[in-house]
Amino acid sequence: MELIQSFSVDHTKIIPGIFTSRADAVGGGTVTTYDIRLKKPNREPVIDVAAMHSLEHIIATFLRNDPEWKDEIIYWGPMGCLTGFYLILKGSRPSREIYDLILNAFKAVDGAKEVPGATAVNCGHYQMHNLAMAKWYAAEFAQYLEANAGNCAVFEYPKSQRLVTDDGKHFYDS
C-alpha cells in the first residue's frame, strides 16, 4: 500500500507552523489542505483533548464567520495525533498567505466567553471542553507565530528521505 502524502513528512523535524500539506484538483478547481501545527510531534506533550475540542469549536466558528474568508473555508478539525489542526480551503495559495487568518483565529480565542456549540444538541461530547486551557494553547501559538513570522521553516515542511530497495520497492521506516 502506498504511503499517503502526510506521512512522507519527517515528523522528527516538524516544528510548529503553518504548512501546505497538499493541493488537490476537485471539480475544475483546487482545494488545499494546510497543516496548522502547534506542537513538535513526538517531542512535546500533545494538546489536552478537552482543550483541543474547545479550540476546534471556537476556531471553526471564527473561520466560518470571517467576512473575508468564510466562503473559502471547507474544513477545520484536529489531527488525530493531537499536535495540530487541518484547515482545508478552496483554491491554492502559499501557507504564508494564510498567516494573518491563522494568527487572528488563535488570537480570537482569548475573547471567547464560552465554547460555541457546547450543548448536547450541538455537540457529540459537549461536556468535554476546557476553555481556560484552550485560551492558554491559543495564546502560546499566537505568540510563537508572531515571534517566528520571518522564519521560513515555519511555512515549509521538512521532507523525509525514503530509501528504495534494489527491486524498486519503497522502504518506510514508519
Image (cartoon, rainbow, N blue to C red):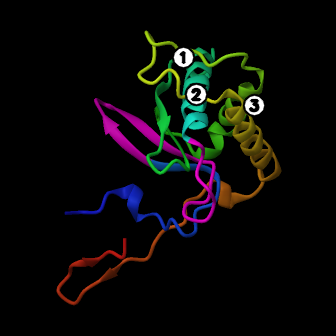
> Is 28 contained in the magenta span?
yes
Disc marking residue 129: 2
Residue tagged by mark 3? 107
Residue tagged by mark 1? 118
Q: Dividing the image into 4 quarters, which one contains the C terminus?
A: bottom left
At horizontal 47% and vertical 45% (from top left) the residue drawn is 79
Q: Give the range drawn in magenta.
A: 22-48
Q: As drawn, which residue projects farthest toward the front?
A: 127
Mark 2: few/some/many CA within 10 Å (<14, 14-19, 20+): many
Q: Which sits in the foreground, 66 or 109?
A: 109
At horizontal 63% and vertical 30% (from top left) the residue drawn is 130
Residues tagged 1 and 2 counted as in contact (Cβ below 8 A): yes
The Cα–Cα distance between marks 1 and 3, rounded to whole angstroms, is 20 Å
| Amino acid marked by disc 1 | Ala
- Relative to residue 103, is residue 8 depicted above or below? below
- Visible residue check, residue 100: no
Disc marking residue 32: none
